Image (tube, rainbow, N blue to C red):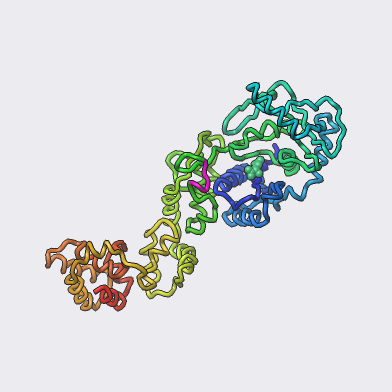
Amino acid sequence: MKQIVTRFAPSPTGTLHIGGVRTALFNYVYAKQNNGKFLVRIEDTDRERSTKEYEENILNNLSSIGLEPDEKPINQSERNEIYIKAAEKIIESGNAYWCDCSQEELEQMRKEQTEAGKKPMYDGRSRNLGIERSEKTVLRLATPEDGEIIVNDLIRGEIKFNNSELDDLILLRSDGTPTYHLCNVVDDFEQNVTTVIRGEDHISNTPRQIHIQKALGYPDLEYAHLPLVLGTDKKRLSKRNAATSLEDYRKKGYLDSAILNTLARLGWSQGENEVFFLNDLIKDFNIKEVQKAGAIFDITKLDWLNSQHLAKLTLQEFKDSLKPFLEEIGIDINNHNNVDLLIDSLRTSDNNFSGIANQLYPYYKDIKEYDDNAIKKFISDNDILHDLKDILQNIDDWNEESINKALSTYQEQNNLKVPQVNQPVRIALTGKTKSPGLGLTLEIFGKEKALKRIEKML
Ligand code: GLU
């Protein structure tokens, strides 16, 4: 059997989109689970919209998230000769012809078709005219007029297309440059691709591309068209309903493994199992189980999976990953007397590293802003805070246990509720009402700093 070869073929007209990462991921996993190869091809034939910066962004992000191609990526913009040769081969086989219809003529034709209630498409009028090549001619593929093309899709099963609905698409433009479909088909052949896994938006291209393959005598390919990625509003995922760039998520502090986990779940699931890593996916993923319906990308799902993946990190790994996010807000992670206890106690304070870094801010630096509503609610007079300051002052053995003991004795003796005692101190220490257990929070701050903050509050 032939070695499975898949490819991810982005057009570098934007940064790496999370929908693109999902396509790349499924291609990668399918190749790896079949002991095959995963390739990347940059489809940069649209010279106006493609840039080198986007290309680098895509390639760097793919590698750094772990989807490293098995061969050096190729660029379509450097391969014109190969495509032109292929076009010549199609001419020789008699499956293509030159057409000199002007824009006006084509527009008129479409207008008449629309008026007659027909689908507007090129009607093949130049096909049998034996037109010679000139600066005005484009090369068109002579698509069979009858019969049908059957695409065997790994996800969707048989999809049938009537040839009569496909017009004779252009292979070479009048300036001699090859068109997108020709390049795409030639490259799949030249790269020995066996399996095309791409978004559902490409389904209508597939029968056209198969006709080009047939004209060139290329072998058949396997196809899998992935469901669209939708936003929570069920519309196609776009900048209007979510952050779409992979970088946005990495910058917020989502782990690569959690991003991949979330993307793998876009259209695929396996029983109750939610949390998995790339290696699990290579073991368990089955492309035939991918659903047909659009798949919703939900940030709350990513948040949850990220917290699951964060929980699997050792403290050291967690600290290493968190460090740059603290640096971003001007904090050196080691600039604290009780770093390990601090980080360990706050590692679940948010779902991503930038959120966690913000939670850590008051433990390293002066409080930026106090929660005014919390102050109004819990600190109506200073009496309790005064008492607590005195009590804390007298604790010699500054640890979670003895602090908690002193606090609860005070609370019971004065017949107070827990929040009446704890929240004023918590607000004084962190500016807000959320922190780890109060004894632990006080221990982390250390006696001196804790008392200073309480004084400041008073
Ligand atoms: N370049 C196309 C895109 O970015 C992908 C084409 C393909 O996978 O065949 O949507």
Q: Nearer the viewer, residue 240 or 420?
A: 240
Q: Is residue 35 visible?
A: no
Left/right placement of residue 427 relative to residue 380 reads: right
| Residue 5 image-quadrant placement | top right
* Residue at the image point whose x is 66% and y is 54% from the top: 55
Relative horizontal placement of residue 118, taking residue 429 as reference (left or right) = right
Q: Is residue 113 left or right of residue 172?
A: left
Q: Is residue 108 above or below residue 240?
A: above
From the viewer's perspective, is 366 left or right of 171? left
- Pick whichever, 257 or 385, lies toward us: 385
Q: Mostly what secondary structure, the magenta segment?
A: loop
Q: Is residue 72 magenta-colored?
A: no
Residue for point 73% across, 44% down:
191
**Residue 381 drawn at (x, y percent):** 18, 69
The answer to whether residue 179 shows anywhere in this view is yes
Q: Position of residue 143 (x, y in %)?
A: 75, 27
Q: In the figure, 361 relative to 32: above or below?
A: below
- Give the residues drawn in magenta, as a range: 236-240
Position of residue 236 relative to residue 437, above or below, is above
Residue 307 at x, y percent in the picture? 42, 54
